[in-house]
Structure formats: C-alpha cells, structure tokens
Amino acid sequence: MQVLVIARVIAGTAIEKVLPLVKPEAAKVWEYYAADLVRTVHYFADNSGAVLLFEASNLEAVNSAVTQLPMVQAGVLQCEVIPLAPYTGIAELFAK
C-alpha cells in the first residue's frame, strides 16, 4: 500500500530548534529509503516541510516509522498520514 505523509514544521518553532535535527532527520529518511519504505521525498518550496511517499504492507508500519523520525520525536514536526488507493476513474473512459 502507498501512503502519503505530509510533514510540516510546527508553526512558531524556532529555527534553532530545527537546525540540529536536520542531519539526523535526513539520515532516518535515507534509512527508510534504503529499506524500500520511502519511495520519494520532496521539500516544500519554502522549506517548511516535506512530502514523503511511503510504501508498506500496512498503515501501522508507516505510522510506526513516522513516530521514529527525529523531528517528530522532538516535537517540532507534525505529520499528516494519508493512505492512498489506485485511481480507477480511467476505466470510465472505456466503459460500454
């Protein structure tokens, strides 16, 4: 199953609290990427967060991984976890 995770730095968080966590956060995301848990990662253009596409056997695995992110553990990052389903609307083009 694929799961979209929208991760945002909590509004009002001092940059001094975030900066020391950038490298550990990147290392954890790389760990997930190398383990085929994270498929893609994109920053928001304003650097206020990121979007990650996870692929896992179940939602619990993704939720568990998200709670292990250093910025989540430090309380500076909030994540919205959105399970995805394949788009089936294209089939309507060929319906009889």
Image (cartoon, grey):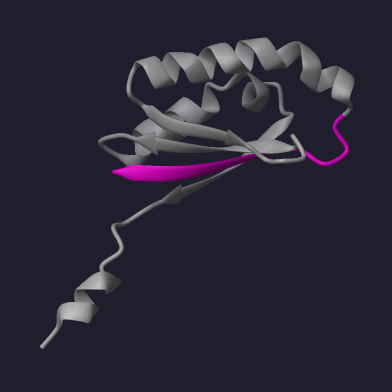
> Which quadrant of the figure has residue 74?
top right
Q: Is residue 94 left or right of residue 7?
A: left
Up/down of 75 relative to 44, above or below: above
Q: Is residue 1 left or right of residue 44?
A: left
Q: Which residues are magenta?
A: 1-13
Q: Is residue 88 magenta?
A: no
Up/down of 53 relative to 22, above or below: below
Q: Main secondary structure of the magenta part?
A: strand
**Residue at screen point 36% across, 26% down:** 37
Position of residue 40 measured from the top left corner of the image (x, y, whole percent): 45, 33
Q: Nearer the viewer, residue 46 or 18?
A: 46
**Residue at screen point 62% across, 11% down:** 24
Quadrant assignment for the N terminus: top left
Quadrant assignment for the C terminus: bottom left
Q: Is residue 4 magenta?
A: yes
Up/down of 37 relative to 2, above or below: above
Up/down of 66 relative to 20, above or below: below
